[in-house]
Image (spheres, coloured by chain):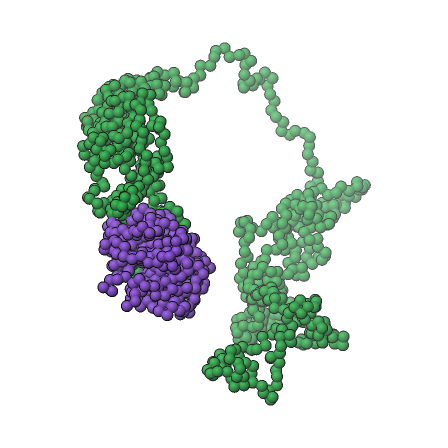
Chain colours: A green, B purple
Amino acid sequence: MSHKKRTRATFDSDNAQSGPPPHAPYALYGTPLPPHDEHIRDDGSFVPLWKQEVTDERGRKRLHGAFTGGFSAGYFNTVGSKEGWTPSTFVSSRKERAGKDAGKEVGQRVEDFMDEEDLAERDEAQKLETVGGFAGLGSGSAGDGEKGMFADLFRSKGETMGIKLLQRMGWRPGQGVGPKVKRKAKGDEKGEAHLFAPENSRMITFQRKTDRKGLGFAGEGKLEDVKSSAQNNDDDDEDDRDARILQIHRSKVSVKPAKTKKSGFGMGVLNDNGSDDEDPYAVGPQINYSRIIGGDKKKKKGGLTTTNAATPIAKPTFMSQKLTQRTTTSAGFRKCHDGRFPLDGFVLSLAPLTLTEENKHPPPEVPSEWTPSRLGTTAPAAQPSTFQSKADAAKTSNLDPKSRAALLGEQQLPGKSIFDFLSPATRDKLATATGRTNLPAAGNEAAPMGFETSGAERARTLWDLVPALDRATAIAALQRGSTGWMPYAEDEAKRDRYRDFLELRGGTRMDLPSRPKAFSTEEWVKELKEFAQAADVFKPISSLMASRFTTSSASAPKLASDAPDQPPAATPKEEDPAEKAAKLGMYGPLTRSRQPFYPSRLLCKRFNVKPPANAAAGGEDGGEGRSRLEVVSQASLDRMMGAGRWQGSSGQADGGGGGGSGDVMVTSPKREEVDVERNQALEGRRAGEAVFRAIFGVDDEE
Amino acid sequence: MSTSAFPSTPLVRLTGHNGPVHALAFSSGSGQYLLTGSQDRHIRLFNPASGKLIQKFSAHGYEVLDLDVSADNARFVSGGGDKTVFLWDVASAQTLRRWQGHVGRVNAVAFGGEGDGVCVSGSFDGTVKVWDGRSRSERAIMSLGEARDSVSCVAVRGHEVFAGSVDGKVRVYDLGSGFVETDVLGESVTSVCPTKAGDAYLVSTLDSKVRLMDRGSGACLQVFGDEGFVNESYRVRSTMGMADAVAISGSEDGRVVVWDVLTGKVKDRLWHKRDGEKSKAASTKKDAVSAVAWNQMRKMWASAGGDGEAVVWGSVD
């Protein structure tokens, strides 16, 4: 830390010199101290380690007390120093209080006590916000309304160029733009007409519709509103609308929705503002029909001034006869109780409005001997109801379509029913199945011309009944039969049929297995299915799997009178022939085998060899991932998997055969021409058992 | 006559290793130098002519089991018990690459490919991995896992990679055709060495026999054996010499046996062991001559033994 890092240039120049510098000839390795010069003051860059103090770029001491062995409570290694433990940035404010020179840099600031982490945290907490003026229109704040017409002018801080230009041309904010208007000054009725600037046009605003009421709907308190607006029109004190000068052009003014009463009919308890004059049960429109022009200022807001309800009953007071005098005018018209006249065109009635007890419209008189016709007789019904529903009628009918058609007078259709073609047995089956005995009789007719099934077709459908069996399985089962044991030993005919079925499936025969006379088609099909299953079961297992199992002496499933089975030969290991040959010293085709191994393209590139056709598509991944930590190679695993599927569905039993034949196929060019697809031994005439045993040696071929 | 005589004079005995010498490699071309790798984790570079030790390479954490030198003599590759394949720079004596990927000890290494750009390594885990010396990749280009047991020896000839395994088979991976040809030997294979022409290869097996197999058909062209020649327990390797006219193999009893390829008869029996002729003690593992290397240019060859010494043989004339 004390020795500043040399620049590249100095390093190079130093390096360019050969040997140590002249002022330090002993320094063969490393860099010597700079040459001693009395004129250059020692700047303290070569102090010993124990004198070096660690400071950061702001001069604060780093390496707190734990490094120097003292506890300093965060006061930056000032323990034991001249400053003591007063913060270095402390300035006494006894004489000069802070605030007097608030803008001065001197003094304690928060930043003095914050290190990089704190500063970073503070910077992080700072957020960028839009200045209020730039926040945009319709921010939803209440200030929008307050600014009113000036909102559109002073949207942004400062004046726009347009405003500046207008002002140069004599416009003042608040005025309209256009030719001057000759009118009287506002509020001045008698004054002369002067030229005034036109009114400022109002920006058309659109009130956003947030409710789902109809257009123009003004709420349930609409009447209240009309009344209050009628009342308060002249009263601008309570209104926070625009300035008075705008009222004249009220049509252009878009009425802000006044405070609508949120409540519906009547008022709730919560709306109670303590005014007892309100009657919550007042029914009817709260229309204030009495208007006071320039009347008393004390208005009851939202109050009711007339009620239709009965006025509170006053204590009956004696009223002299002079009441009529008091209450009638000179013209003989009556006045209301409080002395006011009724409305124009109305006359107070003389007679009170009362309900009479009399029934002015009594019901008609009923004759004495009249009996209602609706009353039923009390005598019980004599005869039972002969009513029959449609369903019951349909059930009891014994008509068939033909007789019905005759009844209806319809013409018979020329078609035949299917029952004409069915045999009686089938028809009986249908009848028992459906439970209906009224099926038409079966006419055992032959199919019409052109619809008969030919003999070939009949045979084909028979073919479809024969169960499927894998060719390999069939061949294997046959082989086993040839060398070992065949099922159905007790029934020679059955065994022959089994063998025929296997041969058919193996490909040596082309015709259907024969059906014994006693068998019906179904039984024959059942027997064939049994044969297929038996072939699956009794197919010999491949060597790989066989090597994992040893057969017991009674391994073969025995039928009741089955002949004792020959003990199967021990299944050899897969490599046995090669190993045996190698042990014998017969190295050659028996010991040589060839498989593909899919070199990667990169590998071929490195060897400057054209990648063969079976080069692996993937690079190292394929090679690495595939064969890492393999105890058994992939190829043999595949072989085992293929061979091990002998118990699986019959459609996939080719795996074993395929794997095995793959090997055989590849090496076949080396040997004599062996065509794998055709096996002469099986497809040709079957040779004797001895030949088989001699060639194959054991049961299985794989 | 001297041209057909086998060089059987021990020229110099190179000592210094503290354990059995498992690996031997002459430098390419003129074969002026000899590299030895030993159980003591060091690799030594000798000048056989002077017998001096020139350089010592130390980086392995476990024994060094095989060595191979690149064609330009600038790099060599080594593998051993630490499951890592080291690619060394001869001049700086530092490792250029350390390829990890094997999960068992590395039994055999060999250069291959164009300009010796790849290193092939066979390991106890049964895989043969091919490492790329050109790219900076840490992963093997390819891993060949056909062997069912430890791979004891690898060799590269052209575009064919030979791998002999303890499962008794020699697999030849032909990169041109994409096929691997497996030859069943019957006994665990300890060494495989293809001929210069590539039409045959010499294979040592643990039944104390050395065979020359035909590459094309897999037939055995020649079987070499000797009554004193033992290869039953340790990895004893063989090589071909004198332009593929002789087969040289070490033996577990301290000897080196030389056969003539055409006739199959023993040409020479040489004692690598110090005072081998005189000692009557039973052979221990310290006697086994595990590696032999042939240098065609100078008609020299070397044998490395369990006694920690490498003997350089030549002919004095």
Given residues B190 and A567, the one toward you in this image is B190
Q: Compared to A262, does A49 lie above or below?
A: below
Q: Residue at x 43, y 53 (%)?
A: B103
Q: Quadrant of residue A103?
A: bottom right
On-image quarter of the N terminus of chain A = bottom right
Q: Residue at x 28, y 34 (%)?
A: A699
**Residue A569: x %, y % from top left:** 31, 33
On-image quarter of the C terminus of chain A = top left
Q: Compared to A610, does B219 lie above or below?
A: above
Q: Quadrant of residue A202?
A: bottom right
Q: Is residue B265 visible?
A: yes
Q: Residue at x 47, y 83 (%)?
A: A17
Given residues B232 and A683, the one toward you in this image is B232
**Residue A501: x %, y % from top left:** 25, 29
Q: Position of A271 compared to B169: left or right?
A: right
Q: Position of B182 compared to A46: left or right?
A: left
Q: How many marks?
A: 0
Q: Is residue A598 visible?
A: no
Q: Residue at x 59, y 73 (%)?
A: A194
**Residue B77: x %, y % from top left:** 38, 62
Q: Quadrant of residue A167?
A: bottom right
**Residue B43: x %, y % from top left:** 42, 63
Residue at the far bottom: name it.
A39
Q: Position of A244 compared to B12: left or right?
A: right
Residue at the far top: name it.
A382
Q: Compared to B164, does A409 lie above or below?
A: above
